[in-house]
Image: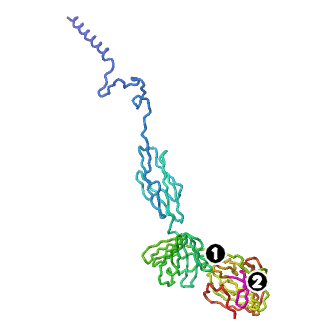
Amino acid sequence: MKKLLSLLALCAMTMVSCEKWFVDDEPKKEYGEPTETPGDNPGDNPGDEPNDPNNGTGDEPEQPEIEFQLTSEAVMEFSAKGGECVLTYAITNPDETLTVEVDTNADWITESDALVAPANEIYLYVEANKSVEPRSADVVVSYGVFSATVTINQSADDELLSYLSGIYYGNTYGDYNYNVVLSTAENVLDIVTGDYYLGEGHRYLFLDLYSAEASAEYNVKFSVPVGEYTFDADNTATAGTVGADYTYFYDATGEGEQIGFAGGKVTVTKDSIEAEFVDADGNEYHYYTLTTSVDNTALFKGSGKLCELSTLAEDLEINFESPSLSAECYDDYYVVGKDMWVLYIDDYATGHSISMELLVPMGEAPVGKFPVSNDLSEERIALPGFADGYGDTWWSWYFLYDGYDIVGEAPIVSGSLEIVDDGTGTHTATFSFKEDKGLTISGSCTAYYVVSGGAGVLSAKHRSVLPTRK
C-alpha cells in the first residue's frame, strides 16, 4: 500500500514538471504589462527601421508649408505732418525659430515705441516732413526667406516756409520794427532800396512785427525777438503787434494769389516763427519757419547789374574852377549803426558834379578817408554806385551837367575819397575813382564845407536826381 501511494505521488510530480517545461517556459508577465503582438519588435517586418515615424516606409516626414503674406497696402501716402503707420501681415504654419524683421533706409521712419503692437501688426512712426520737397522710402518686412516691400510716400510741407529775409527799421515808424518775409526763396528783400522780389513757383508771408526790444546788431544781423505778436487792424505800431497793412500772404506757385488777414497772432520762440491767421471769411491759415535770424552782411550792395553804364570814353581828370563842398546827414538811414551822409562836390562853371553816399561813425563829421566799398565792418566807406531795375541811380556817381540837363554820367565802383579839414575854414577833397568800364575819374578841390544834419528819413528817390541848381 505504501509502495502504491509513493508511485502515484511520483507520477504526479513528474506530470507537473513536464507541464512547466513545455508550456510555462517563459516567465509570466506582471499584471498591467502590455502584451506584445507580431510586428512590434524590430525586424519582425521586412524594411522596418528602429523608431521609424513613417510606419516603416523609410521616407522623411512631410513638414507643413509656411506661408507669409503682407495684408496691408503696398504703397502708403502720408501728409507732411507724418504720424503712426500700421503694417499688417499673416503667417500660415509659423516656424517658432523665425521672427518678423523690419528694415528701412530712411531715418525718418522708425519703429514706434508709443504703442505695443498686437500679433500680426507692426507699428511705425513717420516723422514730420519739415521740407518743401516730398520724399519717399521703402520698408522691407521679412520672415525667414520671405519678404515684402511697402513704399511710404510723404508730401511736402505746405505750411513750412524755409527762408527768412528781413529789414530792421529800428524805431523809425513806432516801436522797434522787424519787417520780415517767410518764404520758399532766399533773399526776398533788398535791404538798400526796400524793394522785394517775388519769383514764380514760390510762396511768401510778409509780417510787420513791432517789439519793445531793439536789435543789438542793427540791420546787419538780427533775430526777431521772442514773444507773441497780436494782429493789429489799427496799425498802431506798438510793441507786441503785427501791423495789418504790411502783413499778407502771396502765393506765386499759380496765378499769383494774395491773401489778406483779419485776425490772428504770430508766436516767436528762439528757434521758430509760427503764424496763425484768419481771413474775413473765417478761413484759417497756418505758416511757420524754423529760424528767427536774418543775416544781411553780404546783402548790403547794389541790386542792379552794372553793364557799362558809364558814358565816358577815356580817363577823366577834373580841373575845378569854382568848386563847392556840401554834405547832408540823414542819421542812421540804413539802420546799420552808421550815419549816412550825402556828399556833393560841384563845379557849376564846368558842369562837373560828384554825388556820393558816405557811411560815417554815428555822431562824427564826414571827414577822413573813405574807400569805395560796401563792407560794413570798415569804419568809413563810400558806397559804390549802381542803377536799379527802374533806371534810378543809387549811391555814388559822377554827372556832367549842361545847365539842368545831365549829358554824361558814370557809376563810381572803386577807388577812394579823402576829405581833410585845412584848419582855415576850408576843406580839401581829393579823389581817384574807377567807373564800371575801368576808366579813372580823379581830381582835387578846396572849398568851404557846408554841413547840415539831422534831416530824418530820406526819400527813396533822393539819389535819382541832384538838388535843383540855383
Q: Is residue 410 magenta?
A: yes
Q: Circle 2 is placed at which residue position?
A: 431
Viewed as shown, does residue 179 lie left or right of 143? right
| x then y, percent, for residue 435 | 74, 79
Viewed as shown, does residue 441 lie left or right of 74? right
Q: How is the image coloured?
A: rainbow
- Overall secondary structure of the magenta section: strand
Viewed as shown, does residue 163 lie left or right of 374? left
Q: Is residue 261 magenta?
A: no
| x then y, percent, for residue 128 | 49, 63
**Which quadrant of the view contains residue 459?**
bottom right
Q: Residue at x 64, y 78 (%)?
A: 389
Magenta segment boundaries in residue numbering:
395-411
| x then y, percent, for residue 343 | 70, 87
Q: Circle 1 is placed at which residue position?
A: 299
The amino acid type, in three-letter code, at marker 2 is Phe
How far apart in space, not on screen, are marks 1 and 2 (Cα)? 26 Å
Q: Are marks 1 and 2 in contact (CB under 8 Å)?
A: no
| Mark 1: few/some/many CA within 10 Å (<14, 14-19, 20+) | some
Q: Is residue 180 above or below residue 68?
A: below
Q: Nearer the viewer, residue 297 or 365?
A: 297
**Label 1: which secondary element:** helix
The amino acid type, in three-letter code, at marker 1 is Leu
Q: Nearer the viewer, residue 105 or 188?
A: 188
